[in-house]
Amino acid sequence: MSNERDVALFMAQIYDQTDRHQDMVDTMKKVIELSADLTNDERNLLSVAYKNIIGSRRNGLRMIAAILEHEDGRGNTQRVASLNAYRKVILGELEKYCNELIGLVDLSLLPAAKTAESRVFYQKLKADYYRYICESRSDDEKTEPAQKAKECYEAAMQISNAEIAQYRPTSLGLILNYSVFLYEIIGEKQKAIDLAQKTYNTCSSNVEKNSDNSYSEATMILQLLRDNVQLWTQDNE
């Protein structure tokens, strides 16, 4: 069994390198069936698999939204109708994959998680994918996934605050994504700015406590937090 799983992991990496995103997703699902207790590297592979397949659809929805606005402004009703129909197809695909990953986390991955790092990772993953569902829904339609995302982010924050140093990449990445959720999805803009700014101020002097492998990732996330604070502050002036 372990040999079969090793081969599957190897092929998942090959599919990633050759942009075979659906094959990568299917292979990581097979890996989880063989054992749902994933290492850090395996968790990252799973994340990349779904990020690739979701990312193209998120980008597509953003592009369609911009084109829709343009065509609607010009009164091109037939084009607008066709674009709305196509948007519905892509949104359906995006939500299918998001719910698929959320189901994997709930049914297999979280029950098998043995460390605080893995529990935070999975709660954050669920929250992120509920957030992606929210992005292209109307205000009325995003209430439920937004509430679920909030609950998952807060569950992850609770574990992280109790068991993981804040300067670790796992904690910093969680705070980065949670602050984006606060700002972009539920409109708690000042809370998002305060959280990102406080985290940056607190962790900048402690980031060197990370191992060599984690230092560059933590530094990159801190820079993203700083960039967001600057952008959000300008937008709110």
Image (cartoon, rainbow, N blue to C red):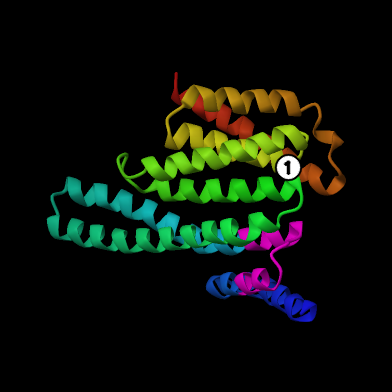
Range covered by the magenta-colored residues:
27-47
Residue in front for this viewpoint, 191 or 222? 191
Q: Quadrant of residue 20?
A: bottom right
Q: Is residue 31 left or right of residue 64?
A: right
| Label 1 packing within 10 angstroms: few (<14), some (14-19), many (20+) | many
The residue singled out by tag 1 in the image is: 169
In this view, the residue farthest toward the top is: 237
Q: Is residue 40 magenta?
A: yes
Classify residue 82 as left or right of residue 237: left
The image position of residue 235, as x and y in percent, is: 45, 26
x, y percentage for residue 76? 14, 54
Residue beneath the point at 42% across and 59% down: 94
Find residue 152 and report its horizontal and vertical position in percent: 56, 42
Reply yes or no: does residue 145 show up in magenta: no
- The kind of residue tagged 1 is Pro
Residue 9 vs 213, above or below: the answer is below
Question: At 43% across and 37% down in the image, what residue appears?
Answer: 185
Secondary structure under the numbered disc 1 in the rendered image: helix
**In the picture provided, is 134 more to the left or to the right than 129?**
left
Res. 167 visible in picture = no
Residue 111 vs 161, above or below: the answer is below
Residue shown at 80% from the left, 34% from the top = 207
Q: Report how many numbered discs are placed on residues in the image.
A: 1
Please identify the quadrant where the C terminus is shown.
top left
Q: In this view of the protein, can residue 107 be seen by the observer?
A: yes
| Residue 163 in picture, x, y percent from top left | 76, 37
Query: What secondary structure do most residues of the magenta stretch adopt?
Result: helix
> For residue 78, which quarter of the picture?
bottom left
Q: Nearer the viewer, residue 184 or 156?
A: 156
> Between residues 172 and 234, which one lies in front from this camera angle?
172
Q: Quadrant of the N terminus?
A: bottom right
